[in-house]
Amino acid sequence: MSLALRPLRFKDMEELGLTLVDESGLALRQVMRKARQRLKESGSVIATSVKTFLEFTQANPNIFRILFHERSGTTRALRVAVAREIQYFIVELTDYIQSTGQDHELAFAQAEAMVAVIFNAGAEFIACKPKQRQALEDRAIMQLRFIAAGALEMNNKNKHSANAR
């Protein structure tokens, strides 16, 4: 007995778009898990995460294009769905940063800034020429290190201020 595959049916383009955004978000979360697995083998959290994310965008450019394009898309439902998926990404990163000793507020602000940088790098990465990709990767790593260093400095100042009281 063979199973016949039925074509997927969507009531409208918005429903199709929402399904694509959900699938894209799932793929992004899988990328984060893959990056965490790779961290066990590598020393640099930022470099490993950037390389993993950019490899993902290169291998799956359409998934990334959907998220980037619909972030400011024409329908509110799609904008909300993309914002939700990006928020999941930020929350997971916030949890990781907090596990390193940052307080929640700083960890969340750091995660938001980092996600903004990496999403912009991803959009540039899929549009740039192969010769430019290494320079873009290096720049994203440097920018994320700036953010991490600034957040660490703020965290240390906050702890110092709290201890001085």
Image (cartoon, rainbow, N blue to C red):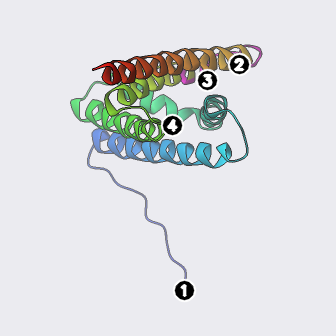
Q: Position of residue 92 (x, y in %)?
A: 42, 41
Would you place residue 16 above or below residue 136 in this image?
A: below
Question: Which mark, residue 98?
Answer: none
| Range covered by the magenta-colored residues | 122-132
Q: Secondary structure at mark 3?
A: helix
Q: Residue at x 60, y 18 (%)?
A: 140
Q: Amino acid at mark 3?
A: Ile
Residue depth check, mark 2 versus mark 3: number of the one nearer the observer? 2
Q: Amino acid at mark 1?
A: Met
Categorize mark 3 by other alpha carbons within 10 Å: few (<14), some (14-19), many (20+).
Answer: many
Of the residues under marks 1 and 2, which one precedes in the sequence? Answer: 1
Q: Position of residue 163 (x, y in %)?
A: 34, 24
Task: Answer with the quarter of the image where residue 66 lies.
Answer: top left
| Residue underneath mark 2 | 133
Q: Distance of mark 3 from mark 1, alpha carbons? A: 43 Å
| Residue underneath mark 3 | 126
